[in-house]
Image: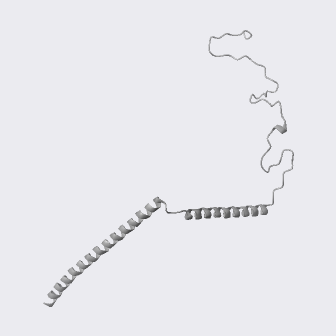
Amino acid sequence: MAESKLVVASAVIVPEEVEQPADFLGSGKRRMSSFSDEKSKRAKLGNEASPTNKEAPQPPTTPDRVQDRRRSGQLEERKRGQRLFGALLGTLSQSSSSTAQKRRTEIERKQQAKLRLQAEEQDEQKKQRRESLMAVRRKEQTKYDRQSVS
């Protein structure tokens, strides 16, 4: 019965057993490459050792490396400062005569004038309150003096 083929009325297809090729790994994950040439691979980038040169370059000593980093950090910081200063000067040197800028200065000037008027009005009101309070105190003082004399 195992030798005879079964026909099943279904949409499922039963695969037949196929012989595996010789270059197929037993794990079932990947086939081994039939062509392996070191020259066909891409070269590594960076300062890493090349595949032909097995000797690794000696890293610089620790104090030299620290000094190099410090110097490069200082140079980068200086360049950054120069760029920021240049950007600041460029911003300050731009013309501020645009219509929007003129409108802003006009609005600011009007607000300053309005604030000045309000401050003057408040000072005037304070002055009037003080004068009226002083007048009331004088009247009461004279009244008190008359009562104390009598």
Q: Is residue 88 left or right of residue 43?
A: left
- Residue at 69% across, 61% down: 76
Q: Quadrant of residue 84?
A: bottom right
How is this picture coloured? one colour
- Residue at 86% across, 50% down: 55
- Residue at 82% across, 25% down: 22
Picture layout, residue 51 above or below residue 91: above
Q: Is residue 28 left or right of residue 109?
A: right
Residue 97 at x, y = what percent?
49, 62
**135 or 113, which is in the foreground?**
113
Considering every residue shown, the one lying at the far bottom of the view is 149
**92 or 116, which is in the foreground?**
92
Count of all numbered marks drawn on residues in the image = 0
Quadrant where the C terminus lies?
Answer: bottom left
Q: Quadrant of residue 81?
A: bottom right
**129 or 22, which is in the foreground?**
129
Residue 89 at x, y = what percent?
59, 65
Residue 37 at x, y = what percent?
84, 36
Residue 51 at x, y = what percent?
84, 44
**29 or 43, which is in the foreground?**
43
Picture layout, residue 141 above or below residue 42: below
Picture layout, residue 95 above or below residue 141: above
Picture layout, residue 53 above or below residue 76: above
Q: Is residue 55 left or right of residue 27?
A: right
Considering every residue shown, the one lying at the far left of the view is 150
Quadrant where the N terminus lies?
Answer: top right
